[in-house]
Image: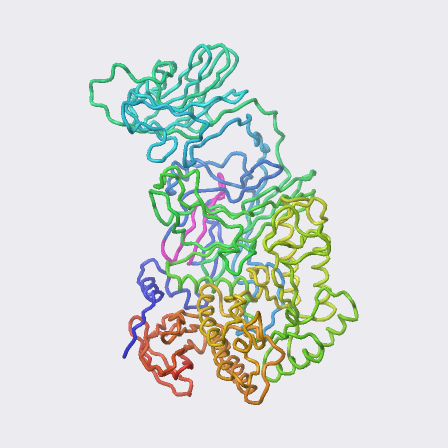
Amino acid sequence: MKTLFVTPAVLLAMSCLANTFAAQPDWLLRGQNYPATVAEVGDTVVLDNGLVKRTIRTKNGSGTIGFDNRLTGEQLLRSVRPEALLNIDGTDYAVGGLVGQPIQNYLNPDWLAKMTPQPNAFVLDRTEFGKTQQRFAWKKRPEWMPKDLPWPAPGVSATLFYRAPAEGFVGAAPARKVLLADDFLQQKLDPAWTAHYSKAHDRTSFENEGKVGEIMALPQTFAAVERDLPTGTQIVQCKIDPGTDRGGLWGPGIVLMYPEKNIKFNLFAIKQKFAVLDEPAEKYQDGKSYLLRMRIVPGAVFCESSLDGKAWSLVRKVDVAGTPRSVRLGKTGRDGALVDNDKPSAEKAELGRCKFDEFRAFGEQLPPTDKGPVGLQVEVHYELFDDLPLLSKWIVVRNGGESTVRVKSFVAEMLALTESESTVDENTTWNYPKLHVETDYAFDSMNIRGANAAVSVGPDPQYKTQVNYGLKTPCLLQCKPPLGPDLSLSAGQQFESFRVFELAFDSTDRERNGLAMRRMYRCISPWVTENPILMHVRDAKPEAVKLAIDQCADVGFEMAILTFGSGFNYENADPVYQAKIKELVDYGKSKGVTLGGYSLLASRKAGTPQDNTQGVPARFGVMPCLGAQWGIDYLKQLQHFMEVSGLAVLEHDGSYPGDRCAATNHPGHHGLEDSQWVQWRGITDFYKTCRARGVYLNIPDWYFLSGGSKTGMGYREVNWSLPREYQEIIERQNIYDGTWEKTPSMGWMFVPLTQYHGGGAAATIEPLKDHLPHYDLRMANLFGAGVQACYRGPRLYDADQTRTQVKKWVDFYKAHRQILDADIIHLRRADGRDLDYFLHVDPLGKEKGLLMIYNPLPTPVAKTLSIPLYYTGLTDSANVRNADGGTKAYPLDRAYHIDLPVAIPSNSYSHFVIQ
């Protein structure tokens, strides 16, 4: 019997190889073929490594004008945006940027010559090129790593230095107070507007087909909305696209309603002229959208037009007494009345469309502004890495002025991305652009999708020509903190943002994209490849700890953690207690075993209620504020304990989950707006300090980019209270599911040697010698996957036969450490109905693959499996060694598969090494 298994990953890989745009050779199979470069090319800076390329214009305005996925030949960018945005002291400032792009669907290179610098933006001053730099110091632990990895990851850097414009930020604040603004982007018309429709046709509407602001009506009929004007209105302004309307005097426009008369200003579409008080004036350009403005002064109204909102032309001045009480937008009859033409044209009338948006009512002139934060300098940093389609970006703000400024908020990255789908109707789910983006501003989850707090892909309000009627297509990437940072910068101080990482995908296949992400984490967070074999010691008494250390050293375990419930206390500041822990640390070192301990942060109270987060419900009910004195002291205490004792592991349960604090009397932050940033910076600075000292970080949250080593591979505590036979299958399912985006070394599992959360004798393994088959299978699951578990109990073995079994698996793991810590290709998920199996692959290793197969059935299974070997890097043949040491050569077919006969005993497993 033969079971065929062709993975989508392999089919996609084959199509990539055949793609004429695909880079050769496949970057996922080769080590060093795509060195990063940075250079000035004409009026641009170009970062390119043959996999991805970013092009930044540097003359006559600055901005990213190209983001090429060189793997597929796709252009990821459809429009230009500023390189960053800053809110300083409550005013928004762009860093670079270009204006003048006629549509947002795509960027024609010919348009760039006519595009100009964004007004009132920081301007590019100079550029510098160099090499990548480490984000923080990392003391490597090579004894836990399958192979050495460079730090920093090699590549190139470019820094663009921006300054205030020479004339200062003249007019940085609005020239007039905005009293009312409506861009008609909502789902329904704002109820403040009253709609008036002709009955000449049942489709007459100001919300045609769900698009607020779009009029559908017959040419000489009315369709308008009306609302009262705010007190003090001095200007009303609206952007109008005449579309296919041919209403003549009933053409789209604005009506100001005075007590004695109405002033109407509209587009006379038949003659392509503006009209005021129903009298045609000068011509306008057909096919263009126009801004119509009515400027109100005592005794008169000035009717003005503009294409760009900068240059205004006077169409007509109208004398009028009094103050307007309301405004109408739309198609209206003579004098702005809500009537149809009583003498319609003899020609057959057809429905026409026109569009209104960007309505504004402005008030008084604001007082002249100063020249803005002229002393600020902004650095925009880019890094491009060798051999990966991966870019990094961040900003630094330096206060070179004399006054203190406040950085209220920022956007470190904004990209107008090409959309992945064009859906006319509203979608509840969307396909997103083929770009994985994450930042180190991450917390509150064991996976990146939940932790990626600062990254959003949402609608682009500038993209008015997209297919989606509601303009809701997610195609604008923004990387910004959800709150704050709201930090003060004194003269001479600087502020640095989080880091953004952008990884281009070359397919939509889950496995291939997962391989790319795992390669990325090994590059930008290489400490995640440290994968020590560890034990959870449940009793911190010296004799119990020494017993655990002795057993760890005897069988080859590399780490012992004084875990939750053991009695160990990281917060104990007593020097005598710390000295006793140091004795245990030193004892462990003498045996080659690293000792560490557990500390709980989230979901517990601080010393006093005032030191907890205030005003906002905490993620886990209660949370100490790291900006309170207790929080500041807590992090100092952990660091001090590590320094004096030599503890080299921190199991930090419930790390900072992004909670906010409204307290105004905490020394570390001034209020709500800066509380999240301050706490995130506090915890990540602490973690980076740990990394510099070689301290291993076991954290159940996504802090990998800030020094974290592991999070849960798949973890529900009550599952380890289930009967043993259930745990076996669930464990393999968790590993299979948990390694799509994580490497095996990035996740931990759990083995309850003693009772954990209940379940009694049926759930636990003690006495170990009485449950050797189960203990053996659990280690086959874990060591066979390269996933380390927390073996929780007082001991690892209780008899010679138990010791022999544990040592067998430790020796197996260490003999194959490089391939077992390598990527997993997902073949068949465990379901208890048939064989389940996965394949480790390492195209650069001596062992190219290692296949683990499990049989959960009570009967033996013999069959031939079709095993995909594309990602092993083998092309023609594979030498396969079975668990007994026998080796056989198998030819690869053109789908890079081999047909492998297997025979797996009941309730057992086997492995095959592929070279």
Q: Does residue 818 lie above or below 698 as drawn?
A: below
Instruction: Name the residue furthest bottom.
Output: 800
Residue at x 24% of width, y 17% of height: 344
Left/right of residue 98 with respect to residue 110 in the rendered view:
right
Look at the image and say whether residue 60 sits in the magenta stretch. yes
Q: Position of residue 525 (x, y in %)?
A: 55, 63
Q: Which residues are magenta?
A: 51-73
Which quadrant: the N terminus?
Answer: bottom left
| Visible residue check, residue 819 | no
Q: Does residue 890 lie above or below 671 as drawn?
A: below
Left/right of residue 583 with respect to residue 713 in the rendered view:
right
**Residue in front for this viewpoint, 894 or 720:** 720
Which quadrant: the C terminus?
Answer: bottom left
Name which quarter of the figure residue 226 lies in. top left
| Visible residue check, residue 361 | yes
Name which quarter of the figure residue 460 lies in. top left
Q: Position of residue 97 (x, y in %)?
A: 49, 40
Q: Position of residue 274 (x, y in %)?
A: 36, 19
Q: Does residue 456 lie above or below 788 as drawn?
A: above
Q: Does residue 563 lie above or below 91 as drawn?
A: below
Q: Position of residue 514 (x, y in %)?
A: 43, 63
**Residue in front for this viewpoint, 232 or 281:** 232
Residue at x 34% of width, y 24% of height: 197
Left/right of residue 489 with respect to residue 84 in the rendered view:
right
> What colour scheme governs how the chains and residues are painted in the rendered image of this protein?
rainbow
Look at the image and say whether residue 419 sits in the magenta stretch. no
**Count of numbered badges drawn on the protein:** 0
Left/right of residue 262 with respect to residue 158 in the rendered view:
left
**Residue in front for this viewpoint, 265 or 25:** 265
